[in-house]
Amino acid sequence: MMDGMNNGWGMGYGSGWIIGLVFMVVVIWLVVKVLNRNRK
């Protein structure tokens, strides 16, 4: 047991913010990619 911090991703220690950060980076990258494709 990891103090109930396990969020289902096999990680603990409050690492949910890392997943959120990676998700935000991926979303921003996709938006930039789509905008650049439409500009051509």
Image (cartoon, rainbow, N blue to C red):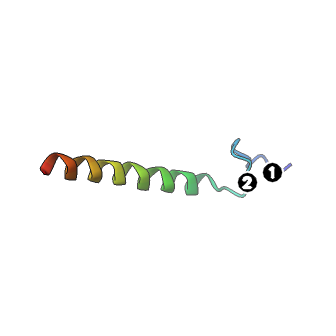
| First-in-chain label (2 vs 1) | 1
**Distance Cα–Cα, label 2 vs label 1:** 8 Å
Q: Residue furthest front?
A: 40
The type of residue carrying mark 2 is Gly
Query: Camera-side residue: 27 or 13?
Result: 27
Kindly identify which residue carries mark 1.
Answer: 3
Dot 2 surroundings within 10 Å: few (below 14), some, or many (20 or more)?
Answer: some
The type of residue carrying mark 1 is Asp
User: How far from the left and from the top, in percent, is residue 21?
Assistant: 49, 56
Horizontal side, residue 15 vs residue 22: left or right: right
Q: Are marks 2 and 1 in contact (CB under 8 Å)?
A: yes
Kindly identify which residue carries mark 2.
Answer: 12
Horizontal side, residue 1 vs residue 8: left or right: right
User: How far from the left and from the top, in percent, is residue 26?
Assistant: 42, 52
Residue at 73%, 49% in the rendered image: 5
User: How far from the left and from the top, in percent, is residue 13?
Assistant: 72, 58
Horizontal side, residue 20 vs residue 32: left or right: right
* Image quadrant in which you'd find residue 14: bottom right
